[in-house]
Image: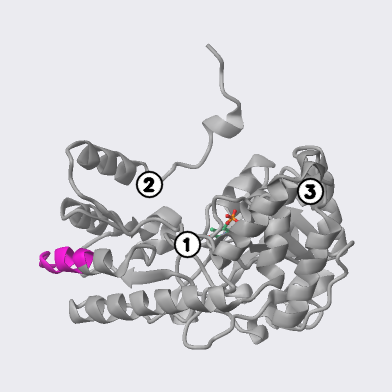
Amino acid sequence: MFDKADRLRKLPPYLFKEIDRKKMELRAKGVDLIDLGIGDPDLPTPGHIIEAMKKAVGDAVNHRYPSYSGMLEFRAAVAEWYKRRFNVDLDPEKEVLTLIGSKEGIAHLPLAFVNPGDVSLVPSPGYPVYNIATFFCGGESYTMPLLREKGFLPDLDAIPSDVVRRAKVMFINYPNNPTAAVADVTFYEMVVEFAARNRLLVCHDAAYSEVAYDGYRPPSFLQAKGAKEVGIEFHSLSKTYNMTGWRVGFATGNREAIDGLSAIKSNVDSGVFQAIQFAGITALRGDQACVQKMNDIYTERRDLMVSQLKKAGFELDTPKASFYLWIKTPKGYSSAQLATRLLEKGVVVTPGNGFGEPGEGYFRIALTQKKARLEEAMQRIKTVSF
Ligand SMILES: *Cc1c(COP(=O)(O)O)cnc(C)c1O
């Protein structure tokens, strides 16, 4: 009866549809599927954060509309955390904004800065929201392919000058989903220089900044000299504190960018439930031992899977960060064929092309299952001869 708007009718195809359909079909048949496809931590939110929420939820002060830009105390806790973690100074009033999860902020940002016909520079393979959010504004995405031989970093010099001229924003994401690649401050300084020269707003998605191995600490984009003049960084409590269901994140950096995003948001949503912000304050200001504990668990899982996969003949790099493994498909297999083959054995993996065409020839495994389940998955994978 109702014609959907063009922006829905012309939505880029959802490439996981076929896998999702087969998953449902097998589950309905009662097959015990091991899902290594989900980018959602299986571990619970640390107890002290839950306690803070319990305390705050009963206080009537928190039952009213929160402030649009977030409680000043939450934003101050973010600024303190940035100082301790990255040695970056932030003004909590002008350079920090509370978000209903970082996805919300990323999705709304182009509404503030992208006009119809403008270009967003978007990494591929990548988190689909950068592309879709641009499309919703009538903008065009220009794909920056992330290639293994370039360390899965975009090649800025390869972007045609007429595209650069029309570009308004550039999305980057390290530690990266899905490739698990990391970037150093030198790369961020190149990005800052490129953005300043071409008047671009850089949006760095740092959702995995705290999920890292072997003592490695991923840097913030804002550590690069001049970054605050050209960029905004998105963080999330989702992966750091196993809080994906709570919906709380934040944006930091350039004042005009924060201000623009805030103006869009104040017309769309009414902020984050204050009790959740209190829980977030406890998370950011509290003991960070829970983060180390979580990373120790992922490390054990990573080591198990990397060694077993290599033994089984798969080609992959050992990740320094994120909870993903990005693995080459065996010779003769496309991403979709490989995913289908493993699905027949009861193992769900994500085909790399679902994150964009340059992801073809890879598949992604998430380390978000218990060790025993991962071992069982490996047993099943080993029964396939490629
Ligand atoms: C999980 C994820 C996010 C979003 O997380 P929120 O729960 O919305 O904060 C953002 N970017 C990437 C790359 C992710 O994988």
Q: Counting other residues with Cα less than 10 Å from the Cα at mark 1, is it few (<14), some (14-19), or many (20 or more)? A: many
Task: Specify the amino acid type for callout 2.
Answer: Phe
* Numbered badge on residue 96: none
19 with respect to 41 (left or right): left
Task: Specify the amino acid type for callout 3.
Answer: Ala
Q: As displayed, is residue 226 above or below residue 283?
A: below
Occupied quadrant, residue 3: top right
Residue at image point 80% right, 53% down? 70
58 with respect to 64 (left or right): left
Label pair 3/1, CB-CB below 8 angstroms: no
Residue located beneath label 3 in the image = 112
Label pair 1/2, CB-CB below 8 angstroms: no
Residue 157 location in percent, x, y? 63, 76
Closer to the chain start, of discs 3 and 2, is 2
Q: As displayed, is residue 213 above or below residue 232?
A: below
Residue 345 location in percent, x, y? 16, 55
Looking at the image, which is closer to me, 176 or 213?
213
Residue 27 location in percent, x, y? 23, 41
- On the question of residue 110 being in view, the answer is no
Q: Counting other residues with Cα less than 10 Å from the Cα at mark 2, is it few (<14), some (14-19), or many (20 or more)? A: some
Residue 139 location in percent, x, y? 67, 46
Residue located beneath label 1 in the image = 125
Q: Quadrant of ligand 1?
A: bottom right
Residue at image point 53% right, 57% down? 127
Residue located beneath label 2 in the image = 16
